[in-house]
Image (cartoon, rainbow, N blue to C red):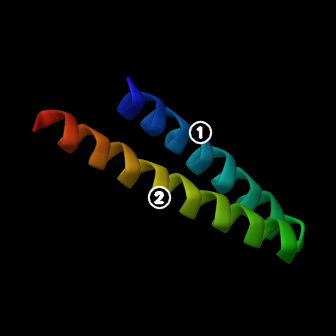
Amino acid sequence: MGEFTDKLDAAGNKIAGKAKELYGDATDNTELEAEGKAQQLKGSAQDVKGDVKGKLNDL
């Protein structure tokens, strides 16, 4: 169950981060754009965490 939750959170952070990045770019708000990029990285890290949990459960 933890793997699925991590992957779901990852997808949410990637989508929200991309939206922030695009909105920040469109409005010349570099702070919001950077926040969006950081949130996307957080989502990528959560994705890896979910992968690791999945591999550990396979053992």
**43 sits to left or right of 53:** right
Which residue, given by chain and number where applicable, does mark 1 sit on?
A: 12
**31 sits to left or right of 38:** right
- Where is the N terminus found, in terms of image quarters? top left
**17 sits to left or right of 24:** left
Rendered residue at 36%/54% (across/down): 48
Which badge, 2 or 1, is on the more N-terminal residue?
Answer: 1
Which percent across, then down, holds residue 39?
65, 58
Rendered residue at 43%/38% (across/down): 7
Say which of marks 2 and 1 sits in front.
Answer: 2
- Position of residue 43 relative to residue 29, above or below, is above
Contact, CB < 8 Å: mark 2 with mark 1?
no
Query: Which amino acid type corresponds to the residue marked 1 in the rendered image?
Result: Gly
Mark 2, secondary structure of its residue: helix
Which percent across, then down, holds residue 29?
89, 71
- Marks 2/1: CA–CA distance: 12 Å
Which percent across, then down, holds residue 33?
77, 69
Which residue, given by chain and number where applicable, does mark 2 sit on?
A: 45
Q: Nearer the viewer, residue 56 or 42?
A: 56
Residue furthest toward the left?
Answer: 59
| Quarter of the figure with residue 12 | top right
- Where is the C terminus found, in terms of image quarters? top left
Mark 1, secondary structure of its residue: helix
